[in-house]
Image: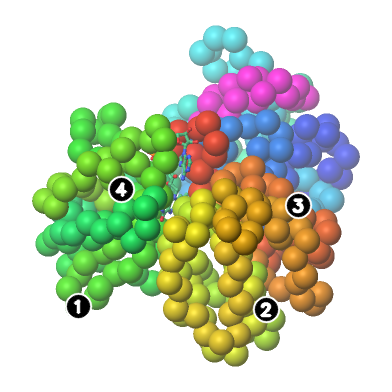
Amino acid sequence: MSRVIFSINQCSPVEQRLLRALRAMNWNDNWPAQAGFFLEEMGFGSSQVFAFNSLIETIMQADPGFDLLGPLSPFVSRDELNLLAALGNASRKASNALPDVEDGLPAVLKSLVDTCGTALRRAGLPMKTRATLQNGKALPPMTSKILPFQGESSMRRVKVLALHAPTPRVRRIVLGGYSLKSFAVDLPAQWIKVFLPGPTEQQIGRAFTIRDFDTVKKELTFDIALHEGGPMSDWALRAQVGDELQIAGPRGGFKGVDEKSWLLLACDDTGLPAIAAIVCQLPAHLQVQVFIEVADETERQFLAVQPRVKVRWIYRNGSADQPAETLAEVLRYSPLPVRSGDAWIAAEASTIRAIRTQLLRDRGFELGRVHAAGYWKRGEQDHRDLAAG
Ligand SMILES: Cc1cc2nc3c(=O)[nH]c(=O)nc-3n(C[C@H](O)[C@H](O)[C@H](O)COP(=O)(O)OP(=O)(O)OC[C@H]3O[C@@H](n4cnc5c(N)ncnc54)[C@H](O)[C@@H]3O)c2cc1C
């Protein structure tokens, strides 16, 4: 069957921005990581970003032939116009009565379209009124199982074997247990979701990076950066050997870089375990610049680095011979190689936003070569960022 495509100018500016994000979620390379930024720029929170992501994942599983074009395509497909019509209708819907345009959609898809429509309405984004296009493809009933996108399906029960305090504001937790016998780590900086004990619906789960996995003893180590007002941070302060937790994963991780290029690594306390895991696995000849922001000198940790890795510690509270500085400020004035490189950054969401803009706009980094994930967001519990993988 021939593909039917139209000019993107058929879409309103809001539709075009939304479409760019939805397409990015299904595109290759680093595009899924950019989708969250596109949506956040439109005013969506992280849970809404995940609802849109879930919608696209579900559609592509239900109908792999669904015509979602590349993020920067100047065209728009009939399937995409139909999806925009469904989202527009859902955004205008005051009651739960489903409009005609969603007839024939599997129930799981209807509810996702509804959730995303509500998010559009709440964000005050006016969607164009449009009818579904004649001869638009109807999605077949779902045959495949929808995978939970957070990977909670394979929970493992684990026990705390040891606790350490490598610095005043970090608790290092070593986990063990029979369920780790089949656990494997494929990439540096992969992360797990750690769940505190509690009733399933209210269970508190947060993402933490695997700092180390001992493949012989089957012991997993992760670090928690302590802070005010977080259930996981509070747990870390009172944790004891023998405490039981559940974990899910692993996910994400550092997928490597062009070895002829150079690499920028940057993080705050929450990204430090990831960067510690990455630097010790990089090829010796790779030129690497690392920027790490922590509270002060007492938070500095030992990093096993190759000779071509330059590390700059940044103290947000200052130190005897360094003024108070932030990661984004230091990166802005630091000399970096002028040739195109790869960047891997993990820190607070607004810092990530500032650095990402700097790298793309002022430093000439290519979009697909900047991996930048918000590991937490000031004022938001359990912040999630698609870019974390
Ligand atoms: C892929 C990934 C990997 C991560 N790896 C690590 C890791 O290895 N080690 C690690 O410590 N964190 C890591 N994080 C970040 C960690 O998941 C968050 O900091 C998490 O919010 C902490 O949970 P909480 O229950 O303590 O606080 P929440 O309940 O999530 O948040 C409560 C309040 O605390 C604030 N807050 C959250 N984190 C911080 C912080 N670090 N400093 C100051 N304020 C904060 C929030 O803004 C909110 O106001 C990772 C995140 C991701 C997405």
Label 1 beta carbon less than 8 Å to ligand 1: no
Q: Is 5 contained in the magenta span?
A: no
Q: Mark 1 points at which residue?
A: 216
Give the vertical position of 178 relative to 117 (above or below). below
Horizontal placement of 264 versus 228: left or right? right
Q: Which residue shows up at 51% across the image and 51% down it?
A: 295
Q: What kind of residue is marked 3?
A: Thr
Q: What kind of residue is marked 4?
A: Val
Horizontal placement of 144 versus 306: left or right? left
Per the model, the C-alpha gap separating discs 2 and 1 is 33 Å
- Sequence-wise first label, 1 or 3: 1
Q: Is residue 8 visible from the viewing direction of this image?
A: yes
Viewer-proximal residue, 106 or 323?
A: 323
Horizontal placement of 44 versus 201: left or right? right
Label 1 CA crowd tier, 10 Å (few <14, some 14–19, many 20+):
few
Per the model, the C-alpha gap separating discs 1 and 3 is 43 Å
Q: Looking at the image, do the residues carrying marks 4 and 3 touch, with CB atoms under 8 Å apart?
A: no
